[in-house]
Amino acid sequence: LFSTPPASAGGGLTVLVDNRAVLDRVRSSDLRVQRVRTPLSAGAHTLRFVFEPANEEASFLAGERDFGAAIYELRLLGVMRAATQATPCPSGTYQPQAGAATCLICPANTYSHAGSAQCTPCREDGHGQWSLPDSADCSWRTPCTADDYMLQYGPCVQGERSVQSVVAPGAHCYADAATYTPPAARQERCDSCSAAGYFEDGDGECVACGGGTYLDRSAEGGPRCVPAPPGRFAPSVVSAFYGQQSEMPAEFSTFCTGSCSATGWEARSDRVDSGTHHAGELDAVLVRDVDMALAGYLMFDYRVVGGSEADGLELYVSGVRDAFLVYHPSRGGEDDGGEDGLGAWHTALVRLGHGSWQLAWNYHQSESSSSSSSLPGKVEMRHVVIQNARGGAAQGTLPCAAGSYSSGGQAECTPCPQGTHASSAGSAACVPCGENEAPRPPVPDAAFGLLGAVSCDQCGQHTHTAAGAAECALNDDSEADPPACGFSPAAGVTYDLSPLARSDEMYGPVLDSRNHAYFLNVCSRQHSNHSCFDGDGEPIPSFACQVTSVGRGEDLGHVMGFEALDEAPAEGVSVRDGLVVHYTGGSRGLQLCQNRMRQTTVHFRCVPTAGVGAPVPHSPVENPPCSYHFGWDSLYACPLC
């Protein structure tokens, strides 16, 4: 059973036999047990089980959550010579075939004594008997108590539905009016269908407001769905286990591993529980996949009933255990028994970022649980709410973030298209950038994901663009036949830096005395940037960037401009000896940069024998603060012939 960090973090479980790996850094995040079988030759062997945690940086980014692996069973076959006579199968097992090496476990509601070739069914006379798997005897069913019943709801018809008490799955009892009489079947009004839904009068159908509408409970004439106004959107809420359900919602799946008496979690009226189990160690897992339209949260109520303090609930978010969930909450005092005396409910809140996640609730029962408590252990959960998840119903509206817009009636805001921007939240439309302006590259938002531009940048010197364009053209439109990336500082002198553009990696790293690394790409921000990442781990689309000694990336300029060399005949410098490239509009530095944007200057020198060449740092690289300087000798810094 594995809980592993993200794939990029490293780590995993390795199993070695005589230093030969039979499992090599195995990883998993679905909480399912994997069985491994490997042959061993005669003689002595050394078995090693090695778990490597995530690297330090990845553990920090994951919030220092717990990662680990559990080994449930280790069985070695062939460690002794064959018996001189057959060994009887122990009680609770059987073997119908001759020449077998192992015995089989008797299923539930059967039993066997030692040496049995088959299992005997439990008696059905009277009130009947029952047994767990691997049992040597059966037990008579006892009269049902109130704890053995659950409410079962019928479909909603004309605003009402039937309610009746039924024996819960996994209860080994029989109905006995002298011990307990459940309430009679009844009809009741359908009160609540979800956290953001209502029952429409007349036909009793549950209406969930979606598709860009939200629930307005104060509307004239009663609750109804209302379209989101322009500039706002209606984020949905996914909810479950609010009451009046008899079956597990289709979005959830469940399974159980170990000494299970049930197949997994079970829906019961207004809640869900981990199933009724008995002796033995087990893990019962409830799973739901969720797609978050924007950052939100998961909230639910839970409690641990019966069992021992070694039994409790774990929550895994895409395979990573949430370290802040209380595993086995205490009752808190003699009077803290909840409304039914089984324990108080506790509320958990977990933040979820934008994107897809897998939620897995795991009830772990220890080997000693059955002997430490007269009441079988389990976890009960209710009122599960996932705020801002796709596929649910909307309770209200929120303003669109800057860089996006909504024309009204939308469940999600639309990122501003290329060539436009939205500078403030709550925009009903995006505005085109002006002449010689281009949208500032969008930065992924932690809550909303990738949005459009929130502002426009002036094109660099000797570059241009028309109004509403997505990019600045990296040349001067005054020229008759301008190069794709370059300019003409004088008549008959034209530079073209296009051959220096790279679509794969950026040039670098170039290191300075403080061990900061710099990366450059001359004529393109579009490249497979595996070098510079922002604080959220997203690549920075820029001509120049810096990676600090602590691994943080900074934009050093995503607007490109050209400048001619200053004529200095006395020093032998002319406009044909090279050019200067400026990258401006980088990330803003507050204290260090006195709120200025970072910028980079590259001095290109015409050296025909240098080939492509590479950037080299000036000394110092940074002078003044947040202004960076490099030199570059290259054949392509020479004028075109």
Image (cartoon, grey):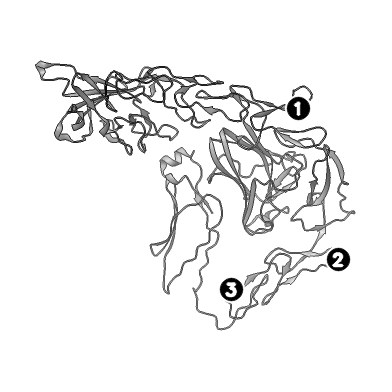
Farthest residue, direction right: 178
Sequence-earlier tag: 2 or 3: 3
Tell me how far mark 2 sits from mark 1, CA to CA.
54 Å
Front-most of residues 609 and 190: 609
Q: Amino acid at mark 2?
A: Gly
Q: Earlier in the sequence, mark 1 or mark 3?
A: 3
Look at 26% across and 34% down and name the residue there: 499
Task: Identify the disc placed on residue 205.
Answer: none
The outermost residue toward the bottom is: 84
Note whether residue 590 is visible.
Answer: no
Whether residue 170 is visible: yes
How far apart marks 1 and 3 lie (CA) works out to 65 Å
Residue position for label 1? 223
Query: Residue 612 location in percent, x, y?
Result: 21, 35
Q: Is residue 460 left or right of residue 322?
A: left
Disc 3 marks a residue whose amino acid type is Thr
Q: Which residue type does callout 1 highlight?
A: Pro
